[in-house]
Amino acid sequence: MEAIGMIQAAAGLFAVAAVGGIVMAAIRIAAKRNPPHWLAMGHGFLAGAGLTLLIYAALTADLPQRAMAALALFVVAAAGGVVLNLAYQMRQRPLPMGFVLGHAALAAVALLLLLSAAFG
């Protein structure tokens, strides 16, 4: 598979994960409770698949600078997602809104960069 195809596939995975992230943030804000575990796991699985594919693409092909920048931001966002899951979600502690919004903002910027590399 060529690089642009891998970037586009990763962008699709991240876009679907973003929809789940928006739903989870809405649950946390509106219902003032943590989202269901199955939703958090699905979000993490899709984002992890996108990240894995993007890392593979970076290791096997020459990616545009915007895709590489997106990769770096997604790695940081993924680390934040792991902390949110293990330190809060799994322990049934309320997700801190600042952390949630920071994770979301970082991932959103990364997704926009990746989309611009994939389709721009």
Image (cartoon, rainbow, N blue to C red):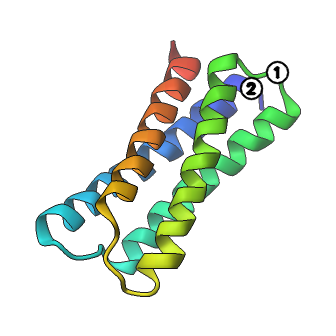
At label 1, counting other C-alpha atoms closer than 10 Å, the crowd grade (few under 14, some 14-19, many 20 or more) is few
Nearer to me, 36 or 10: 36
Mark 1 touches mark 2? (CB < 8 Å): yes
Q: Dividing the image into 4 quarters, which one contains the N terminus?
A: top right
Q: Give me the residue at 77% from left, 26% from top.
A: 2
Residue 42 higher or lower than 12, as above or below: below
Nearer to me, 100 or 14: 100
Q: Residue furthest top?
A: 120
x, y (%) of residue 74?
59, 43
3D distance between C-alphas at marks 1 and 2: 7 Å
> Sequence order check: which comes first, mark 1 or mark 2?
2
Element marked by disc 1? loop
* Residue tagged 1: 62
Query: Could you say which disc has been placed on residue 119 in the image?
Result: none
Q: Residue furthest right?
A: 60
x, y (%) of residue 105?
39, 41
- Mark 1 residue type: Asp
Q: Residue furthest left?
A: 30
* Residue tagged 2: 3
In which image quadrant can residue 54 be found?
top right
x, y (%) of residue 85?
49, 72
In the visual, does 78 lie left or right of 16?
right
- Mark 2 residue type: Ala
> Which numbered mark, 1 or 2, is in the foreground of this view?
1
